[in-house]
Image (spheres, helix red, strand yellow):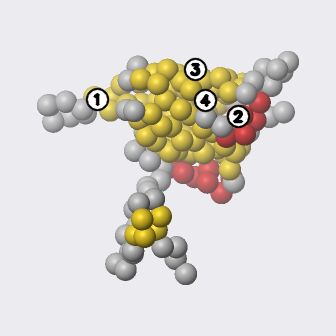
Amino acid sequence: MTLQGTYTFAIGGNDALAVGVLLIREDGSIVGRDQGDLHYGGSAAIDSSTGWITLDLISDVLVQGPAPQDLPHARHYTLHFPPDFGGGSPVNVDTPPGPVHVMVHRTSDDYAPAALHGFTIQVRQEEDSKTLEPGFSRSNP
């Protein structure tokens, strides 16, 4: 089994929220970006006896302070997933800011450019949008 392909990911926790795209190449190397334009790199491997997947990731983090420049800082994560990334089910990961849930899911290779060049998320607000109740909104016809 090969991991080569394009994957979406979502990270959620008390101090984290991110969605992004990872591209795993034939040699197992990883490149990716998230909605905050943070870059991800690293490698992916499958344990041939169990099917478990290990992602060894490095992400750049901008440390913002009172000085006018942002200082780049890298964070390293080693994540373990059941075969097929658990079908996209959340995996709990302890990180320095606190625990997060990570979900990874195979997606169309049409999204591969987002892993290389980045992407943006646009929140759309309709002029005539009507909220029926909290959590429920009118669907577009």
Q: Is residue 118 left or right of residue 30?
A: left
Task: Identify the image quadrant of the N terminus.
Answer: top right
Classify residue 106 by image quadrant. Answer: top right
Mark sitting on residue 91? 4
Marks 3/4: CA distance? 12 Å
Instruction: Looking at the image, tell me whether mark 1 or mark 4 is earlier in sequence order.
Output: 1
CB within 8 Å, label 1 to label 4:
no
State the residue position of label 2.
85
Judge whether 118 appears above or below 61 on screen: below
Residue at 43% of width from left, 70% of height from top? 132
Give the secondary structure at mark 4: strand
Where's residue 31, x and y in %?
57, 37
Mark sitting on residue 78? 3
Mark 2: which amino acid? Phe
Closer to the observer: label 1 or label 4? 4
Q: Is residue 106 left or right of residue 127?
A: right
Instruction: Looking at the image, tell me whether mark 3 or mark 2 is earlier in sequence order.
Output: 3
Where's residue 19, x and y in %?
50, 45
| Residue 26 visible in this rendered orientation of the protein | no
